[in-house]
């Protein structure tokens, strides 16, 4: 349970981090909060030759409204989202999600950008990013690249980030006042990885759902938006009956469920139905 | 090997480490402070919890090189001139330990809660202390012990 040997490099700027990655290629990994990477290294599932520590890069932890976007610095710790200091539906949603991430000491170290780059299928932030179509901003020595969430998540623990790119910032849409957002997650022990989770965001106009974003995480290798659930919701009124129909549609539409010792496909399908329903109920009650 | 300086319980330790050495391994083997225990080594059990710049940290998930120049507090620094401090005394009085393996981590996490100075209601206390595992006590006595110290310092959570 000790990691293999590696060379330790401290990057004092994103430029320096990108330069290190350019020099070492796929032998190097970025060390952010380390709350997922270090366990993986302790199990020797990852054996990077070089670890580039980005924790000391200044001005890299922030939540900042910029026009229609919320800009999130990659090194923003999870705990910061428990009191984000942001108005509106997104500001109300972030603490409810953050609260589900592991335990407090982990939330005080782990980072938003690190979670996205690690891309665990059960990551709350990955599901949020996919649901709201976040934009990931990656930096390399050749410049900056904007990556849409739909293209970012390739498979479990694999993203579109190239070996020489470091995730520096993430943009979420700053949802307007007519949006209602909810979250629900199922796990067997408090603080453990989610088996299934859902983010629901609906925009209401004169009692009708005019936009809908339903995201599901933990069920499949990468977080997904459920087009079937969104279609079921559009144009309807936010009633329990409609929510149940949408949740059923979300569960029925998924074909490639993860199966592991925690849950088989049948259980995950049932959990998708229940979590989407609960996320929608959370959206109208607390969102 | 890299030479680093850890300020542990207000004593400077100059130690040589490999980058792969965890903070808790270094505290135990480099500084000779074996009070911090190593349980799961993947961040689940919390037995290795220490305070780094007054924040609770899983000592198995931070490399010692990352703690270079930082202030570390471990269970060895809690006592009051050889006598139990209030938390240690409360753990004793409420029988908050049996085998004692998780106790150093529990004490350091509880130290952070108490020193934070904020009111803590029972739900929040339970949730934060759930960060660490104990296989003996069933947790109730640990919660009672921390609760007693919080109540005595006016952090009873009634106003929360």
Image (cartoon, grey):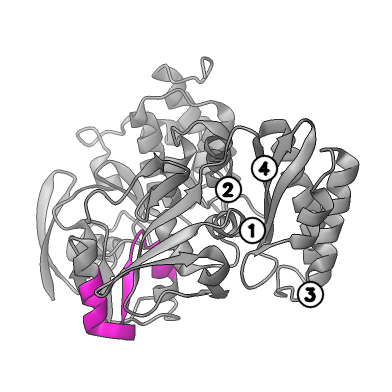
Residue A281: % across, % down = 76, 39
Asked which secondary structure carries label 2, the reply is loop
CB under 8 Å between callouts 1 and 3?
Answer: no
Find residue A158 and report its horizontal and vertical position in percent. Answer: 50, 76
Picture layout, residue B78 above or below residue A260 = above
Q: Mark 4 or mark 2: which comes first in sequence?
A: 2
Binning the other alpha carbons within 10 Å of mark 2 as few (below 14), some (14 to 19) or many (20 upward) gives: many
- Disc 2/disc 1 C-alpha distance (Å): 9 Å
Which residue occupies 36% across, 37% down? B112
> For mark 1, what is the residue?
A194
| 3D distance between C-alphas at marks 2 and 3 | 26 Å
**Same chain check for tags 4 and 2:** yes
Where is residue A208, by image quadrant?
A: top right
First in sequence, mark 2 or 1: give its number.
2
Tag 4 near tag 2, CB within 8 Å: no
Instruction: Indicate whether residue A110 is drawn in magenta.
Output: no
**In the rendered structure, does residue A28 fall within the stretch colored magenta?**
yes
Query: Which residue bears the numbered disc 2?
Result: A100
Q: Is residue A277 visible?
A: yes
Q: CA distance from mark 3 to mark 4?
A: 24 Å
CB atoms at circles 2 and 1 under 8 Å apart? yes
Within 10 Å of disc 4 (Cα), the crowding (few <14, some 14-19, many 20+) is many
Mark 4 falls within which chain?
A
Parent chain of label 1:
A
Earlier-in-chain disc, 2 versus 3: 2
Label 3: which secondary element: loop
* Residue A255, numbered circle: 3
* Span shown in magenta: A18-39
Q: Is residue B104 above or below residue A39?
A: above
Q: Which residue is mark 4?
A: A182
Residue at the spot 11% in from the left edge and 56% down from the top edge: B13
Q: CA distance from mark 4 to mark 2?
A: 13 Å
């Amino acid at each position: 349970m000790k990691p293999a040997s590696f060379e330790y490099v401290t990057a004092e700027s994103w430029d320096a981090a990108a330069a290190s990655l350019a020099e070492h290629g796929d032998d190097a990994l970025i060390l952010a909060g380390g709350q997922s990477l270090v366990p993986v290294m302790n199990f020797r599932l990852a054996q990077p030759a070089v670890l580039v520590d980005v924790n000391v890069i200044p001005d890299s932890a922030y939540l900042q409204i910029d026009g229609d976007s919320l800009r999130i610095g990659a090194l923003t710790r999870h705990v910061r989202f428990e009191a984000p200091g942001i108005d509106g539906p997104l500001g109300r949603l972030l603490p409810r999600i953050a609260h589900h991430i592991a335990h407090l000491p982990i939330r005080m170290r782990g980072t938003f950008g690190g979670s996205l780059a690690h891309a665990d299928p059960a990551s709350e932030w990955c599901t949020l990013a996919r649901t709201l179509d976040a934009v990931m901003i990656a930096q390399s020595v050749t410049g900056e690249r904007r990556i849409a969430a739909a293209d970012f998540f390739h498979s479990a623990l694999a993203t579109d980030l190239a070996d020489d790119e470091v995730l520096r910032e993430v943009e979420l849409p700053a949802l307007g006042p007519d949006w209602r957002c909810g979250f629900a997650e199922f796990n067997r022990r408090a603080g453990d990885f989610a088996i299934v989770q859902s983010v629901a965001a609906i925009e209401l106009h004169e009692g009708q759902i005019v936009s809908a974003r339903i995201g599901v995480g933990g069920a499949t290798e990468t977080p997904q938006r459920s087009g079937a659930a969104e279609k079921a919701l559009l144009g309807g009124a936010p009633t329990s009956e409609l929510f149940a129909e949408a949740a059923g549609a979300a569960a029925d539409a998924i074909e490639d469920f993860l199966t592991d010792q925690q849950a088989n496909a049948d259980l995950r399908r049932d959990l998708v139905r229940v979590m989407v329903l609960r996320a929608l109920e959370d959206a109208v009650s607390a969102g | 090997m890299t030479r680093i300086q850890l300020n542990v319980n207000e004593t400077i330790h100059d130690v040589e480490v490999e980058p792969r050495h965890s903070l808790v391994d270094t505290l135990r083997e480099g500084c000779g402070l074996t009070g911090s225990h190593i349980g799961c080594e993947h961040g689940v059990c919390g037995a290795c919890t220490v305070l780094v710049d007054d924040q609770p940290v899983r000592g198995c998930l931070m490399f010692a090189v990352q703690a270079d120049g930082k202030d570390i507090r471990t269970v060895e620094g809690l006592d009051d001139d050889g006598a139990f401090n209030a938390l240690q005394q409360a753990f004793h009085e409420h029988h908050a330990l049996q085998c004692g393996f998780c106790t150093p981590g529990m004490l350091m996490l509880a130290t952070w809660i108490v020193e934070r100075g904020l009111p803590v209601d029972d739900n929040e206390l339970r949730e934060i202390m759930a960060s660490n595992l104990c296989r003996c006590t069933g947790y109730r006595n640990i919660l009672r012990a921390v609760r007693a110290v919080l109540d005595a310092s006016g952090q009873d959570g009634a106003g929360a």
